[in-house]
Image: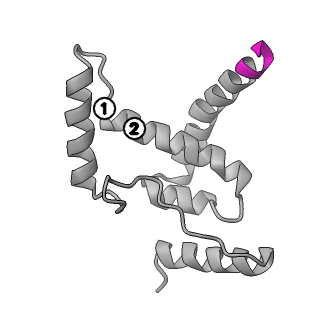
Amino acid sequence: MLTLLDEIEGKRVALAKKWKRPVEPITLLFNSFGSPWTPDGLSTSFYRHRDKVLKGKDRPTIHHLRKNAATNMVIFQHKYPELITDKVLQDMFGWTADTLATMKRIYVSDAAVIAAITRISE
């Protein structure tokens, strides 16, 4: 049985053959040692830095970080549709197809509007 990582690796290798150049795997989040974050390490570091800088009840949470990552992954999906499929996003974030559709409609639509306004005002 193939895992999600096996599937991603297969697509990465296929793209490397198609493009006739190496396609390196992407580590989205890594620590100061250059290794991928563990869930506990990321959480601990996030809250430690957040608490040093921000006070009050409007401080960001890990949920905000996850939402930001999900929004960016859906935006990247438009650039790399062969690599970042809906199935990859569903597996990555633990969403159903309906939840993914809702998230795309709400968050990515907002991000697209903000980007468009920013381009117009420049």
Q: Position of residue 11 (x, y in %)?
A: 64, 75
Residue at (60%, 80%) from the top-left corner?
10
Mark 2–mark 1 distance (CA, rounded to whole Å): 7 Å
Q: Position of residue 33 (x, y in %)?
A: 31, 59
Residue at (48%, 37%) from the top-left corner?
68
Compared to residue 81, the image places residue 72 above or below, namely above
Which one is nearer the viewer's eye here, 80 or 107? 80
Q: Mark 1 falls on what kind of element? A: loop
Q: Which amino acid does the dot numbered 2 rest on?
A: Leu
Residue at (48%, 73%) from the top-left corner?
5
Tell me where residue 72 sits by quadrant: top right
Count of numbered tags: 2
Q: Position of residue 66 (x, y in %)?
A: 41, 42
Which one is nearer the viewer's eye here, 50 or 98? 50
Tell me where residue 13 sits by quadrant: bottom right
Marks 2 & 1, CB-CB < 8 Å contact: yes
Compared to residue 80, the image places residue 64 above or below, namely above
Mark number, residue 65? 2
Q: Tell me the colour scheme of the image.
A: one colour
- What residue did someone put label 1 on? 61
Q: Is 35 on the left or on the right of 17, as rendered?
A: left
Report the span colored magenta: 118-122
Q: Which amino acid does the dot numbered 1 rest on?
A: Thr
Q: Position of residue 60 (x, y in %)?
A: 33, 27
> Is 88 covered by the magenta stretch?
no
